[in-house]
Amino acid sequence: MGRNEDPSKIMITEFGAARSVGGSKLLIEAGLDNVLVDIGMAFDRIKDSARLPFNSESLDAIVLTHAHLDHVGLLRKPLNSGFKGGIFCTPETAILTEQQLRRRFIFESEDCAKGFDYEKTFEISRNVDGTFFYAGHIPGSALTLFEVKAQHRKRIRLLAAYDMGRSDYSDAGLAILNSPYSDFSNIDYVIVEATYGNNNHTPLQKSMKVLEDSINDTYKKKGKMVVPAFSIMGTHKFCNFLYHLNKAGRIPNDMRFYLSTPSSESVTRVMLKYKHHLHPQFQKLLADRNDNPLYNPHLFRHKDLNKTLNFLREEGPYGVVASSAMCNIGRIVPILENTIEDEKNLVFLTNYVAEGTRGHAIRYSNKGANISFEDGYKTLLADVVKGHGFSCHTDIQETMEFLEKIDPHRGLKGIFIKHGTSKNCDAARRHIIENLGYAPEKVIVMERKQAYEL
Ligand SMILES: [Zn+2]
């Protein structure tokens, strides 16, 4: 870095999530200013043991779009190696990032103070201003509009619109967060994600039916429904779906669920602290303190793992929710160890399970297969169901609608694609070119470490 010696040049470079999903690190070089957007961990940890691909001292600022580890996981590194600039993020992102990295540092950054609210423009560096807008991805997540200058150059409006949430929850009355903001105009360049390639989500009504059937089956068999879920949003979406199924009388009224997930409890507290950032539909439901999607007579909380493990000796029917969704770490591991050998039980997977994880083994093994745990193998006899509706990412249809809205006259100078497998990035690019009519040279799949001049 610091390659840009030309005060009139504006360039962007992605160091991580180019043709891959992990490790987001987008550098904006605006004249002599260096602004880093996200500093995420790659899912393949080995790659991260290497040094950062730039010199921390030459960074003027770090902007965090949201608190997922593939966006904030390496924040310690620049702080430990001479970074003196400001950190810019929403207050929820600051708290959630500190919780995950178990260190207070964002609020120590003078520039961040209490975090930046949505729709208020702030100065990031001499040449770069920023504004956050709702991304609808996780609490505190932001689409970020950068207004970038350089010597003798007209101001450029660059919109970072990746890790964008879904808009279908709102239409279905199932929203927790606000839908992604899309009322932008005069954008010059946009960066979008290709998490879903050219695919679409399963319709929410179908997803709800799968959950309903799983609960009713478990209830009839007097079994235990084990739900591995991410602590940020996974658990919350699950509880929200449960609440709505209950209200509609689609599941037994006496089916109880035990939440054994302190990390998601801390996320809940952050959500409640910034309740005004949640979807109005959801805020309305929270008004009833004793009967809302997060706190109601069907949900019980276990602070202590031993309490859960002792409790598991009791007969079903009931459900247990714990993290992590990949089933490799966290409380879900001993819970699965104690439940998968019983055919009355059901494992309800809420998320994508990466290859090489225990979640992947559970999902793709036949009944009777051996699943490896630290103390040996357990035989998988429980049913395994892959749930839908829990993804926090936009699908291709929503991405297309978003582009259509922000650029009805096809005036964008460039659409950059990142955050997706190589195949998905190419598929999304073709889809955008074919269906929205952009010139192929304007739709670019970002290559790692390649600088693009704007
Ligand atoms: Zn994310």
Image (spheres, rainbow, N blue to C red):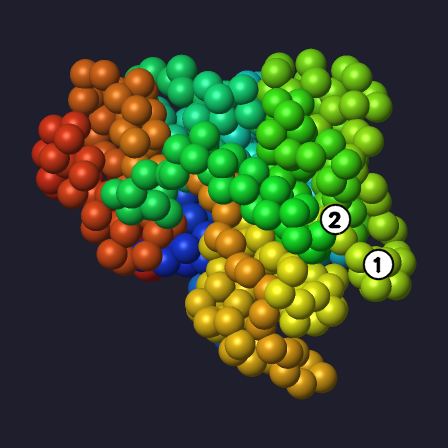
The residue pinned by badge 2 equals 318
Task: Tell me residue 50's x, y (percent).
Answer: 50, 73
Task: Tell me residue 14's x, y (percent).
Answer: 37, 52
- Amino acid type shown at disc 1: Glu
Q: Which mark is residue 104?
A: none
Is residue 305 shown above or below 96?
below
Q: Nearer the viewer, residue 432 or 16?
A: 432
- Amino acid type shown at disc 2: Tyr
Name the residue located 57 percent from the left edge and 53 percent from the top edge: 348
Name the residue located 21 percent from the left edge and 30 percent from the top edge: 413
Q: Is mark 2 within 8 Å of ligand 1?
A: no
Picture quadrant of residue 115 = top right
Q: Nearer the viewer, residue 410 or 392?
A: 392
| Label 1–label 2 contact, CB within 8 A | yes
- Secondary structure at numbered mark 2: strand
Alpha-carbon span between mark 1 and mark 2? 10 Å
Q: Is residue 267 left or right of residue 137?
A: right
Name the residue located 49 percent from the left edge and 26 percent from the top edge: 169
- Secondary structure at numbered mark 1: loop
Task: Tell me residue 24's x, y (percent).
Answer: 46, 52
- Can I make out residue 309 in this image? yes
Task: Tell me residue 22's x, y (percent).
Answer: 45, 57
Q: How many marks?
A: 2
The residue pinned by badge 1 equals 314
